[in-house]
Image (cartoon, rainbow, N blue to C red):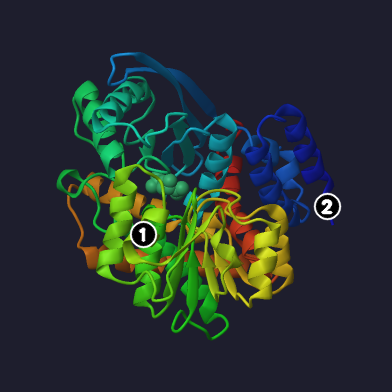
Amino acid sequence: MANAYVERVLGELNEKYPEQPLFLQAATEILNSLGLLVEKDAKYEKAKILERFVEPERTIMFKVPWLDDNNDIQINRGWRVEFNSAIGAYKGGLRFAANCDLGMLKFLGLEQILKNSLTTLPMGGGKGGSDFDPNGKSDAEVMRYCQSFMTELFRHIGPNTDIPAGDQGVGGREIGYLFGQYKRIVNEFTGTLTGKGRAWGGSLARPEATGFGNVYFCQNMLATKDDSFAGKKVAISGFGNVSWGAAQKATELGGTVVTLSGPDGYVYDPDGVGTEEKFNYMLEMRASGRNKVQDYADKFGVEFFAGKRPWEAKVDVALPCATQNELEIDDAKALIANGCIAVSEGSNMSCSLDAIEALQEAGVLYAPGKASNAGGVAVSGLEQSQNAMKLSWTYEEVDEKLQQIMKGIHDACVAAADEVGTPGNYVNGANIAGFLKVAEAMLQQGAVL
Ligand code: GLU
């Protein structure tokens, strides 16, 4: 059922970017869905829309020199991929991670275009970051790093041009240092970054938004089967910002979150990660920079499984919230064998392509991150609106809007999947629903992007 146009574009991409496997993986998943659309209407191929869609409008690459605590000079690399501005200014997070490279940021940027479109807010797609690892660095080192990074990035961004935010390794602390330096250089107080502190333009509910949004999305998926989170055992991976929000909301809706994980392994908490103390401990673990979930097992006296992933646990719902390709084919098989009914991605591209196929074939409800984790960037969009209006909404207002947006995304995915004859396929639904608006804008604006 491969579409010739899609095959050709994917073939060219594979030839051009063999060193960018994550980007090729994301592009393959997306273009395979879009094949169902472009085969129905020749206008896309005629206007070379797919070729244009997979190439970033602009990629900025720069050096980030900084002084460590020993006064030794260190050098890292920084990037900003300004991928697509058809429906709004570039918008997307910054990732600071040792393994970050251009291919990773292109995968994240490509996903971001569709994710942002799905939110229905006017946001284009972008992503940036650095191969700097904030784990184990002192506060002062992180501050100097962020300042040096922004000393180059500032000239490329702005409230109507490109609006960065956080991602892995970039949380409230880093956004603070980045914003401070940006404001100092441009001498303007604008909402150019999102995920800001409450006292200086940040939106209420932004910290919770990605995790909450993922649970709202999953709740909508479960409702299509007349089901809910009540009484469900839930596996969550990671212990960072997304996992923290998801654990709270899944608990509130009646689920029991039995796992968390880190690079060192996973913990199984039979009573559930469901108390204020445990949620707060997640924040403490994150702030410690140790990056070890074993600390949770030591603190609360639960079992720790070194070097293992949480997907071997018997659960009803899985919420991968750590990183890309954290749920592969053997993990999918284990979840299916244990009777898991839903997998909803909190991280971007959590599942490998063969894992997705296995889950879908087994009839597991599966939500791709570009749909289910769009709550974070959606509330970033709401933060921009509040900044532009110079006012701030209540927590309830923001949460209410977030719930509406997640339901809207869910329903748009269902409708688009039906439309192309693949009911219940949220991958096709998300890719097609997200793409339609962007493609329309590109066609109407001419060959400028
Ligand atoms: N990094 C988040 C994402 O993957 C949030 C981006 C934003 O708020 O701009 O969507």
Between 388 and 422, the one lying in front of the other is 422
Q: Is residue 154 visible in this depiction of the protein?
A: yes
Q: Quadrant of the N terminus?
A: bottom right
The residue identified by callout 2 is 2
153 on left or right of 268? left
Residue at (50, 61) in percent of width and height = 372
The reply to whether dot 1 and dot 2 touch (C-beta < 8 Å) is no
Quick one: label 1 or label 2, which is nearer the N terminus? Answer: 2
Residue 124 in the image: state x and y as whole percent.
Answer: 47, 42
* Disc 1 residue: CB within 8 Å of ligand 1: no
**3D distance between C-alphas at marks 1 and 2:** 51 Å
Q: Is residue 25 above or below residue 411?
A: above
Disc 2, SS: loop
Outermost residue on the left side: it is: 199
Q: Classify 10 Å Cα crowding around label 2: few (below 14), some (14-19), many (20 and above).
A: few
Q: Quadrant of the C terminus?
A: top right
Q: Amino acid at mark 1?
A: Asp
Disc 1, SS: helix
Residue at (61, 57) in percent of width and height = 327
Q: Is residue 33 visible in this depiction of the protein?
A: no
Outermost residue on the bottom side: it is: 226
Between 356 and 318, the one lying in front of the other is 318
The residue identified by callout 1 is 298
Residue at (39, 61) in percent of width and height = 297
Q: Classify 10 Å Cα crowding around label 1: few (below 14), some (14-19), many (20 and above).
A: few
Residue at (75, 52) in percent of width and height = 35
Q: Amino acid at mark 2?
A: Ala
Q: Is residue 242 above or below residue 50?
A: below
Residue 355 in the image: state x and y as whole percent.
Answer: 69, 59
